[in-house]
Image: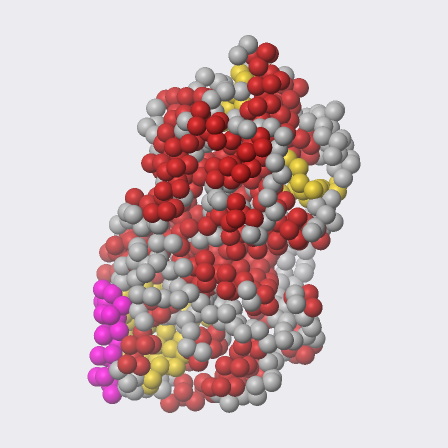
């Protein structure tokens, strides 16, 4: 199985260790992973702002980089949602359709494709609040959102339960958006930051020491909010926890 | 001062004894727990110890784009109001969840409601004609209004032909949409809102901020102040029952002597020509049944084919809105009482145009429960008046631009598109997907600021050229300076004003890979 690793731009820049953990984890689980060297971004910043024409060249580059793989895997629900649902600024050739259909977010790839049932190296003895990125939750169906009357399931929590020592804490508003929202965090900073403050306060009240998420963008925003409020919370990507990060 | 410092009011003091006592016939949850009526069971809103002026809504300047962001920032600058608003609406969202999870077939109901609406809207002409014929056969006068002005003209003519000078009204967002009250005031007709929330807003010269809870952005102290000024109540008494009772006592005389009564419409049944209203205070019954002349304003999208379809929507409406199984009153208005006249005005006001919009027509399915507002994290923190439109919150974001693309061009951007609105919608409108679709339309029609589009063009230019992208972020020490423009899409100061900046990484992933793995891959 040839897996193409997509490291989103903000992971590349701010959280390189998330990319490294993703790569190492996939290799540990037996995948042959390649990192196409000319990759940049999925096009979401432009598309999210309604500027589809401005996203076309970036989308074309993404497809060019990743069309040769059986699977494309990225440690970001948000970017994967963009590729799967909104990579539409370029003509939908067979190649484009193949890339869109074979792009997976890391958690769902581990859960649904590799069907991981054991992570013997993973040990994270901490109180953890799990943050569900909205695109991962409602867009690519990581878990049953609280609004829907459907059987409960949660792919990220299934995986975290394989990690020794993890103690999950419950949030008062588990599915509430943290306010990052891509360009929303820039163009509506007041509401975005308030949502972030409320989110990190909820995590703090729940007694979490760490917040784990499958999305670095939410984590970056929340970390910035928690630090501004002086809360002692630490933020870490699920790829790192599953790859055996000590803390 | 934060909301935690507020003095919680004793529950005993504010909940009516009858409500406290409870009734055994109440619906029960599967675990035997009594499901309380949402409004009665709500936590008392805590009264601020210090007076905090009520933040006002968006500034409206003709057709100029609404600055929702600025108005939201002012709402957030009033922490007591913001916290009470957020807490109250989140409480409704929680009640909605509890109520929905008490109905095992909830998702099937939503699907059924959505399909009934799809069918009805696909044959709207036929059902409207059926409705008109049935209503006429019942002895009702039926009118057609193409827009708000037409609606107001028709109602004014009806009132004038009866020499009516006063009109009592029970909630209708449609009449807000038409600017009805202002038009009547300009023509010498006194219009009195009879529902508590609308009356508060009328007395404060403000529009409703929420389709179900119009004054939800106000604290009890704000209401006490408005009532003290306008109804002569005790300015220091902000007890909810005292205020509600004062409003009721002062409004009842208007109902008893009004020349005409008007209600909105939740559902209009084509086969019987019936208007159905769902209310908790009963004022629609009084407004419709007491005065000798009754008028119902009906948006043409309110049609459902048969009485048997009503049950689906009644089960969904109040559970979605307030978390209560049903509204206190579900009233059917069908024919005039002996010796009185009954009129129904069917209003288009842009609806048939919206019906022709391929990506946006399903917004006509909306039954105005407000569930999307209650769950929306942006709405809860911004207040409904920040949207500067009759319809606020997620549903407002997708229907307001159909009324005026320029004026409401900013609204679809006032969302994180988290999708919770879509999941709570009882008629399964894909709200957040339509928000996404609107952004594209607004960009194509040049309704977003040139600066914003310019930023995206620049981002697209860099992100589509690996060499340019690497040059921009390649050097680790310069990454933090340059990266936010491409990685978090903003200049440093916007991000850093409210949040700490991410730490500068020692090297990018790309650089790490080059250093550690290039020999492995042979590149």
- Is residue B424 visible in the rendered structure shown here? no
Tell me what residue is drawn at x 58 percent, y 37 percent: A216
Q: Position of residue A242 (x, y in %)?
A: 68, 29
Tell me what residue is drawn at x 27 percent, y 59 percent: B350
State the scheme by which the image is colored.
secondary structure
**Between A227 and B170, the one nearer to me in the picture:** A227
Assign the N terminus of chain B to one quadrant of the image.
bottom right
Measured along the vertical axis of the image, is residue B478 above or below residue A61? below
**Residue that protrudes farthest toward the top in the picture:** B522
Q: Quadrant for residue B351, please give it.
A: bottom left
**A159 sits to left or right of B277:** right
Tell me what residue is drawn at x 78 percent, y 36 percent: A125
Measured along the vertical axis of the image, is residue B206 above or below residue A208? below
**Between A237 and B400, the one nearer to me in the picture:** A237
Measured along the vertical axis of the image, is residue A52 above or below residue B11? above
**B137 sits to left or right of B50:** left
**A3 sits to left or right of B22:** left
Q: Position of residue B226 (x, y in %)?
A: 50, 81
**Between B158 and B472, the one nearer to me in the picture:** B472
Q: Position of residue B35 (x, y in %)?
A: 62, 63
Q: Which residues are magenta?
A: B138-163
- Is residue B162 visible in the rendered structure shown here? yes
Tell me what residue is drawn at x 53 percent, y 52 percent: A192
Measured along the vertical axis of the image, is residue B437 above or below residue B372? above
**Between A223 and B490, the one nearer to me in the picture:** B490
Q: Quadrant for residue A116, please give it.
A: top right
Q: Is residue B409 magenta?
A: no
């Amino acid at each position: 199985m040839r897996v193409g690793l997509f490291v989103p731009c903000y992971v590349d820049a701010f959280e390189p260790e998330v990319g490294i953990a993703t790569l190492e984890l996939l290799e540990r689980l037996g995948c042959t992973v390649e990192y196409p060297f000319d990759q940049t971004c999925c096009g979401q910043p432009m598309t999210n702002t309604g500027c589809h024409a401005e996203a076309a060249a970036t989308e074309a580059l993404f497809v060019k980089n990743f069309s040769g793989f059986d699977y494309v895997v990225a440690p970001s629900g948000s970017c994967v949602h963009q590729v799967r649902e909104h990579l539409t600024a370029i003509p939908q050739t067979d190649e484009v359709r193949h890339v869109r259909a074979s792009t997976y977010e890391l958690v769902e790839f581990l859960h649904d494709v590799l069907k991981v049932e054991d992570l013997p190296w993973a040990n994270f003895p901490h109180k953890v609040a799990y943050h569900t990125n909205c695109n991962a939750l409602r867009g690519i169906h990581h878990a049953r959102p609280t609004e829907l009357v459907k059987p409960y399931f949660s792919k990220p929590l299934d995986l975290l339960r394989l990690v020794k020592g993890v103690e999950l804490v419950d949030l008062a508003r588990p599915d509430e958006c943290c306010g990052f929202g891509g360009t929303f965090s820039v163009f509506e900073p007041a509401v975005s930051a308030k949502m972030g403050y409320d989110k990190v306060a909820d995590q703090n009240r729940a007694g979490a020491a760490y917040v784990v998420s499958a999305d670095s963008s939410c984590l970056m925003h929340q970390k910035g909010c928690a630090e501004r409020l002086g809360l002692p919370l630490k933020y870490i990507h699920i790829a790192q926890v599953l790859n055996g990060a000590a803390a | 001062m934060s909301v935690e410092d507020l003095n919680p009011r004793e529950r005993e003091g504010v909940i009516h004894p009858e409500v406290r006592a409870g009734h055994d016939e109440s619906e029960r949850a599967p675990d035997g727990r009594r499901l309380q009526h949402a409004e009665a069971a709500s936590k008392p809103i805590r009264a601020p110890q210090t007076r905090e002026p009520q933040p006002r809504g968006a500034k409206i300047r003709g057709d100029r784009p609404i600055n929702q962001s600025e108005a939201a920032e002012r709402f957030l600058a009033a922490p007591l109001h913001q916290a009470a608003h957020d807490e109250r609406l989140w409480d409704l969202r929680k009640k909605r969840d509890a109520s929905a999870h008490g109905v095992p077939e909830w998702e099937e109901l939503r699907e059924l409601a959505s399909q009934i609406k799809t069918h009805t809207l696909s044959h709207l002409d036929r059902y409207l004609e059926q409705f008109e014929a049935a209503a006429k056969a019942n002895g009702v006068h039926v009118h057609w209004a193409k827009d708000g002005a037409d609606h107001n003209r028709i109602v004014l003519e009806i009132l004038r032909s009866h020499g009516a000078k006063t009109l009592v009204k029970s909630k209708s967002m449609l009449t807000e949409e038409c600017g009805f009250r202002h038009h009547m005031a300009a023509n010498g007709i006194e219009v009195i809102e009879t529902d508590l929330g609308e009356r508060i807003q009328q007395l404060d010269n403000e529009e409703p901020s929420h389709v179900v809870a119009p004054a939800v952005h106000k604290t009890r102290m704000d209401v006490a102040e408005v009532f003290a000024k306008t109804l002569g109540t005790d300015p220091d008494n902000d007890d909810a029952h005292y205020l509600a009772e004062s409003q009721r006592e002062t409004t009842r005389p208007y109902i008893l002597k009004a020349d005409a009564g008007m209600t909105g419409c939740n559902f209009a049944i084509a086969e019987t020509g019936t208007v159905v209203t769902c209310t908790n205070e009963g004022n629609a019954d009084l407004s419709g049944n007491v005065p000798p002349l009754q008028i119902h304003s009906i948006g043409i999208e309110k049609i459902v084919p048969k009485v048997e379809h009503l049950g689906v929507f009644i089960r969904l409406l109040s559970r979605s809105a307030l978390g209560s199984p049903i509204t206190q009153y579900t009233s059917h208005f069908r024919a005039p009482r002996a010796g009185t006249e009954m009129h129904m005005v069917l209003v288009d006001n842009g609806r048939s145009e919206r019906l022709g919009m391929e990506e946006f027509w399903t917004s006509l399915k909306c039954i105005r429960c407000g569930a999307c507002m209650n769950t929306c994290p942006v709405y809860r923190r911004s207040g409904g008046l920040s949207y500067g439109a009759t319809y606020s919150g997620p549903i407002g974001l997708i229907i307001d631009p159909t009324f005026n693309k320029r004026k409401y061009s900013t609204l679809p951007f006032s969302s994180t598109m988290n999708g919770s609105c879509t999941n709570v919608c009882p008629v399964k409108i894909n709200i957040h997907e339509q928000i996404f679709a609107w952004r594209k339309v607004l960009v194509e029609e040049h309704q977003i600021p040139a600066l914003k589009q310019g930023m995206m063009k620049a981002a697209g230019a860099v992100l589509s050229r690996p060499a340019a992208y690497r040059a921009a972020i390649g050097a680790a020490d310069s990454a933090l300076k340059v990266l936010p423009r491409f990685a978090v899409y903003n200049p440093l100061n916007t991000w850093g004003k409210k949040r700490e900046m991410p730490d500068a990484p020692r090297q990018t992933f790309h650089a790490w890979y080059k250093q550690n793995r290039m020999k492995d891959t042979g590149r």
